[in-house]
Amino acid sequence: MYEKERQTFRKIKERLENYRYKENLKEFEAAIKKLITEYNTSNWENRFIVGGALEVLFCALLKSIGFECKWLREARYDIEVDGAKFSMKSNLTGSGDIRLINILGDERVEWKEATLFFISNLGICYADPDMNLKTRHTNDALVINVKRIKENISNNSEWLIPINIPRKPQNSSKIKTASYDVAKSILEDIDSKYLKNYLPEL
């Protein structure tokens, strides 16, 4: 059922591990390091922003190495690569649970998407429901534990692209806040004469 997605992942892995694209990958790693460090997801608001920015950056990386990639912004899928759709999830601690699907009340949902997991100190891991990885329902989400993904790639390294994804900082003296930056940017764009001088302090 997921043969197209698996083949596409294999092609992505092969290309990203090719020395020819070393500088493209290096630039992507630098971009996500800056993203994770400056917009630390310890601030809840930043979690959606970092997830969305990661999708945009990865899409740009894939296009830069010759893939046709679309940023989807759909409910269950984030990117489409050469006609194969993927969900993208990240875990910036390298442990614990990853939310696959948010749920309401006693709703029961099923994981059906080929998924790219961006995991700190590991890289990009591919997994899909036919790999029989154990998931579980919590009171508000269907989750998978990072351990299950690590077990899967320990048996088969073809599902891992080892790139440098840093852990989010544990002690940040200053964390950027996305909403503040958006508000400030808007005021600059409209050439604000009054409000820009009265932005609240972070």
Image (cartoon, grey):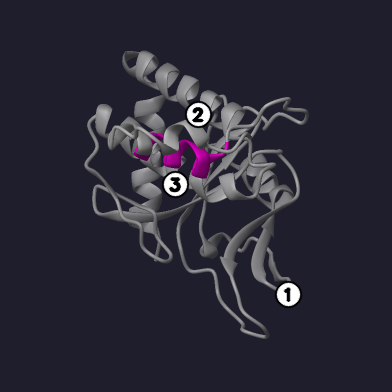
Label 3 to label 1, Cα distance in Å? Answer: 24 Å
- The residue lying toward the viewer, choosing from 201 and 134, is 201
Does any portion of residue 163 appear in the rendered image? Answer: no
Q: Write the residue at 24% across / 37% down.
A: 67
Kind of residue at badge 1: Asn
**Magenta residues, as a range?**
177-186
Quickly name the residue at label 2: 32
Q: Residues within 10 Å of mark 1 (few under 14, many from 20)?
A: few
**Between discs 3 and 1, the one toward the N terminus:** 3
On residue 52, the disc is 3
Residue 114, given in percent of the width and then of the height, sits at: 45, 58
The answer to whether residue 10 is above or below residue 4 is above
Label 1 to label 2, Cα distance in Å? Answer: 31 Å
- Magenta span contains residue 181: yes
Kind of residue at badge 2: Ile
Kind of residue at badge 3: Gly
Snapshot quadrant of residue 195: top left
